Amino acid sequence: MAKLPKNPVENWEIPAVEALRATPDTRVADIQTKGTPGFVGDKALGERLLEERGARLSALQELLYANGRSGDTRSVLLVLQGMDTAGKGGMLRHVIGHVDPQGVDHASFGVPTAEEKRHDYLWRIRKALPRKGQLGVFDRSHYEDVLVVRVHNLVPPDVWEPRYEEINTFERELVESGTTIVKVAMFVSLDEQKARLAERLERPDKYWKFNPGDITERGFWPEYQKAYQAMLDRTSTEHAPWHVVPCDRKWYSRLAVTELLIDALENLDLDWPPADFDIEVEKARLAES
Ligand code: ADP
């Protein structure tokens, strides 16, 4: 059977993967969080395309899964890192929600547990890596250990400082072992964050998302910007580049991440695994059964 044809990506003047890739010139303070880099179209179109492209993402993920079942050891890992309210939860529901949950290895990383604290910061990350054939999704990640940890001096600089290089080495090994890493840094503006937190305080169906600590963290915005800048500067590598995704418009950020995943999966150049049985023999056996 023919491979899934690679369609031209409509309505993207510049493909998401190019438009969003972090460069040495990326300045966190200058990110246009309301922007829609690369995309030409409005919300209505973006939402329609999300459904269409979600279906393609689903088909590609099924190919990855099928190959994994047939011995291919590759996997894809989506790393979502962003400020509170950037929309990580929505990314899971509206992007990853398109694919068969059987094929998704999801992990979220909060304040380390007592057991996690007894180990190296990468210990819990290694345990959560996607299995072969799986689409892994990290909701927060090892980058917390150079973000919140750096901003709040949870460990001294001589401990967090070497982590950038350690992370690069860790990710290189991961890529060499067959995992494509799609790193997404999600950015909202301080104002948009305020509006989203206000909504959580207004709507009973959103109270559960509200965490008083999120307001405290707003006071550390400049420090977070600095930490995000260092993260982009020091860990956007050839083998695992960062993508800078403006998130004030949720429809855009969801469509953009869908495109990034589609691109990663298409680059694996997968085909349906061949039958490992004699088709004619099995047809004959079935007819006689
Ligand atoms: P979310 O806010 O994403 O819904 P949680 O309520 O579990 O999820 O909060 C996660 C919190 O854990 C965040 O404030 C985050 O900064 C914090 N966190 C994650 N990793 C670490 C870490 N390694 N050290 C300290 N805090 C961490």
Image (cartoon, rainbow, N blue to C red):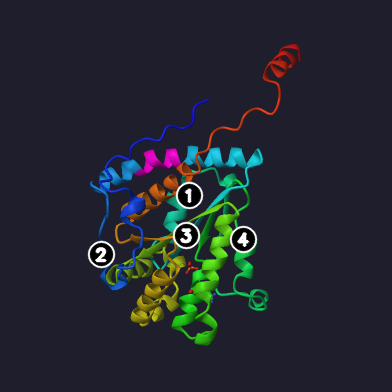
Which kind of residue does numbered mark 4 sit on? Ala
Query: Residue placed at 30% from the left, 70% from the top?
Result: 27
- C-alpha gap between disc 3 and disc 1: 20 Å
Q: Earlier in the sequence, mark 1 or mark 2?
A: 2
Would you call the spot at circle 3 few (<14 residues within 10 Å), some (14-19), or many (20 or more)?
Answer: some
The residue carrying mark 3 is 240
Q: Nearer the viewer, residue 223 or 266?
A: 266
Of tags 3 and 1, the one toward the viewer is: 3
**Whole-percent x, y for residue 229 in the image:** 37, 73
Q: Earlier in the sequence, mark 3 or mark 4?
A: 4
**Whole-percent x, y for residue 54 in the image:** 42, 42
User: Does residue 155 show up?
Assistant: no
- C-alpha gap between disc 1 and disc 4: 17 Å
**Whole-percent x, y for residue 11 in the image:** 27, 42
**Whole-percent x, y for residue 125 in the image:** 60, 65
Quadrant in which the C terminus appears: top right
Q: Earlier in the sequence, mark 2 or mark 3?
A: 2
The residue carrying mark 4 is 128
The residue carrying mark 1 is 96
The reply to whether discs 2 and 3 touch (Cβ–Cβ < 8 Å) is no
Which residues fall within the magenta stretch? 50-57
The residue carrying mark 2 is 32
